[in-house]
Amino acid sequence: MILTTFTSMNFTVIILAGGQSSRMGSNKALTPFSGKPLIAYAIDVARLLSGNILISANNHDLDYLGFPVVKDELKVRAPLAGIHAGLRASNTDWNLILSCDMPNITKGLLERLSAGLDQQVRMVLPLHDGFIEPLCAFYHRDLISLIERNFKEGKLSLLDLCGGVPHKLIDMADTPPEEIALLFKNVNEKKDLIFF
């Protein structure tokens, strides 16, 4: 069975905002960009797609946004921990993982990813220029046990999950390189903001 439209799907958007922000020097999610905090861009696109939104964070800085905030259970500084916490808190099978530091992600891109969802896979991820983007992708709740097993084995890379389950890569080769560069550009330091 292939799931092809957002209206026929029930899924949760999990926004990752639990990083240390060490290179930014302050909470990255709250860094101002064009008049609003970075995380607002992820929230805005999430609201177009789903009424179920969770934020993965490890402090109370984002409580004011009005969405459930879930804290890491796995004691490791890696996106794996935030995804695990979000999947455990989610009440839907499919979950869209969005990093809070990619402000140019569009509804069109996410609709394209959603067209790859089907019951035979457990991850749907974009592929461009030979790179997989695991922080803008769909994850199934069935991954929880694999994440926990990988954690115990010290496998912290999100790409390790791909090797352990059926997944689908959505090739973005037909998208102009300049558009790809903008879509997936992430903000790690304040100087990155000048490239948008």
Image (cartoon, rainbow, N blue to C red):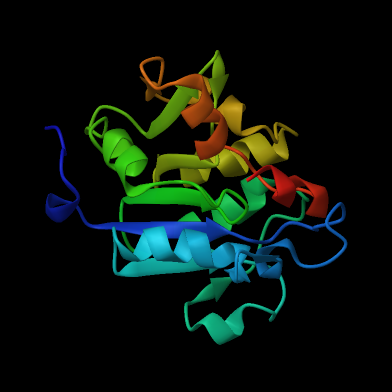
Q: How many marks?
A: 0
Q: Is residue 111 above or below residue 123?
A: below
* Of the pair 166 and 133, the residue shown nearer to us: 133
Residue visible at 44% across and 39% down in the picture = 137
Image quadrant in which you'd find residue 5: top left
Foreground residue, 188 or 35?
A: 35
Q: Tell me which corner region of the image, top left, top right, bottom left or bottom right, holds residue 140.
A: top left
Q: Residue at x 57, y 20 (%)?
A: 131
Residue 90 visible in the current orientation:
no
Figure check: 170 above or below 196: above
Residue 53: which quarter of the image? bottom left
Asked if 66 appears above or below 186 in the picture, the reply is: below
- With 58 as the anchor, is 113 left or right in this view? left
The picture places residue 196, in percent across and down from the top left corner, at 62, 46
Left or right of 23, for residue 28: left
**Residue 188 placed where, x, y %?**
76, 48
Residue at 40% of width from left, 21% of height from top?
Answer: 172
Q: Residue at x 52, y 20 (%)?
A: 163
Estimate the x, y position of residue 65 in percent, counting from the top left.
53, 81
**Location of residue 62 in the rendering, given as x and y in whole percent from the top left corner:** 62, 77
Compared with 23, 59 (above or below) is below
User: Could one spot residue 129 in this view of the protein?
Assistant: yes
Q: Is residue 23 left or right of residue 102?
A: right
Q: Quadrant of the N terminus?
A: top left
